[in-house]
Amino acid sequence: MVSIDSTSRKVLIVVPLVLLVAVALSLNVVNLPFGGGHDSKSEPSKPVKGCRTISKPGNYVLASDFGGATGLTGSCLVINSSHVTLNGSGHTIKGRGVTDTTGILVNNASGVSDVTIHSVRVSHWNRAIHLRNSSSVTVRNVTTVQSTEGITVWNSSDVTIAHSRSAHNLFGLLVDNRSQNVDYSTLHYHDNQLNSTRGRGSVGA
């Protein structure tokens, strides 16, 4: 019979205990979130399925084509909150050519800032895209067609209209005299009655 001295017994007892502690610690480390519990994933986009008002910050994405009835006066999609990104995902917001209606309206009497609209086609409205009382707005990769006014900018500042197209409208772009720092150097025009105006009548650059 092999004899086991006291030192060997201690080693046989201590080694399994050390292994158990190491395994337990490793499991706890795996379950701990990085960054002190902060979720590093970006906020998922909220689907937009029809005409509505967006009144909270966040990312929004059009789930389909829509538009249609808004009455004699009204707007289909209204953004009255700051810090909003609207991804059109290539869809179309189509109106019925009714007077004083708007496809996408960015407006709040208290002001709206940090808004991005991209990848959407807006057609058959009085104003396809209307920016009002807003700042730090980016409109990119959009198409406005067959409307009275393709894109209008009223009382707004630091607006960028990039790599977009305005076609077959009465006015391709209209910017009022109160707006400042409006960059539309990469806006492409096609077959509008008047491509761009500044201040309701004087032809701008």
Image: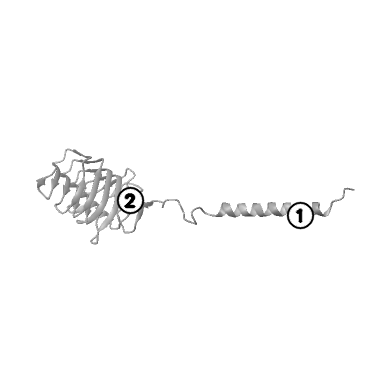
Circle number at residue 106: none
Which quarter of the picture shows residue 75? bottom left
Can you tell which mark lies on residue 85?
2
Q: Is residue 70 visible?
A: no
Q: CA distance from mark 2 to mark 1?
A: 61 Å
State the residue at coordinates (30%, 56%). 82
How far across and how far down the image is residue 171, in percent? Answer: 15, 45
Question: Is residue 92 or residue 43 the one in the foreground?
Answer: 43
- In the picture, measured across the screen, residue 30 lies left or right of residue 127, that is right
In the rendered image, the residue lying farthest to the top is 190
In the displayed structure, does residue 154 sit left or right of residue 35? Answer: left
- Residue reaching furthest to the front: 7
Q: Residue furthest left?
A: 202
Kind of residue indicated by mark 1:
Ile
Residue named by callout 1: 13
Q: Nearer the viewer, residue 160 or 9?
A: 9
Classify 10 Å Cα crowding around label 2: few (below 14), some (14-19), many (20 and above).
many
